[in-house]
Image (spheres, rainbow, N blue to C red):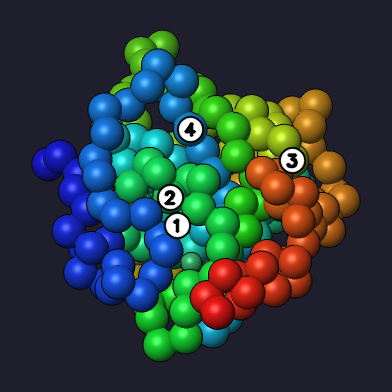
Amino acid sequence: MPRNLKEYTKKRNFKETTEPKAVKKSSATKTMFVVQKHDASHLHYDFRLEIDGVLVSWAVPKGPSMDPSVKHLAIMTEDHPLDYGHFEGVIPEGNYGAGTVMVWDIGTYENIKTINDKNISMPQCLKQGTIEIILHGKKLKGAFALIRTHLGDNEKNWLLKKIDDKYASTKDITHKEKSALSNKTMNQIARAGVLYEK
Ligand code: MN
């Protein structure tokens, strides 16, 4: 089934939020990934992969880890438009996901998933619940996996983990806390957002 942005549009009031409107674009040759730090009711990181003209998205409460022994819960959320990958700002109070959004990391990714030496397409990986990718970000580098789990009988629950390679590390990558786009901190983005609204 082709992916669509109906749920994204339904949840938002574009008269109030500056988040991008839902436009489905054809995928470029290089596929994008983005991780947005989102200070909503609960701070989390939104991990998004360009697949089939949209950003397929997971909310990761603990954020990504470079430690291959760590698995972090990643809850699948609605698909977002590709333009969302460059959205940084403040979603106003009373709106869906109200709070500050930072582009914490952005770059391209490669699908490395194979079965019996055959490449598996990203839509197929999604369907099968196993994604293996190499990230070329400013902060996140190397191989990662997303694996669907049945924790709490909820098929929206996946696990994000680092695959062991030369980039693996036990250092907490979330300590790198400035925007990959603007080099701003969350506080700087929050303050700019408030000024913008007035
Ligand atoms: Mn979010």
Disc 1 marks which residue? Answer: 58
Which element carries disc 1, helix, strand or loop? strand
Spatial separation of the CA atoms under disc 2 and disc 4? 11 Å
Spatial separation of the CA atoms under disc 2 and disc 3? 19 Å
Name the foreground residue: 120 vs 98: 98
For image coordinates 56% across by 57% down, the residue present is: 88
Q: Nearer the viewer, mark 1 or mark 4?
A: 4
Name the foreground residue: 139 vs 70: 139
13 vs 30, left or right, is left
Which element carries disc 3, helix, strand or loop? loop
Residue 68 position (above or below residue 21): above
Query: At label 2, which amino acid type do we have?
Result: Tyr
Query: At label 1, which amino acid type do we have?
Result: Trp
Question: Which mark, by number, is residue 84?
Answer: 2
Name the foreground residue: 198 vs 43: 198
C-beta proximity under 8 Å, tags 3 and 1: no
Name the foreground residue: 103 vs 113: 103
For image coordinates 37% across by 22% down, the residue present is: 28
* Disc on the earlier residue, 3 or 1: 1
Q: Is mark 4 within 8 Å of ligand 1?
A: no
164 vs 146, left or right, is right
For image coordinates 78% across by 37% down, the residue present is: 168
* Disc on the earlier residue, 3 or 4: 4
Residue 80 position (above or below residue 92): above
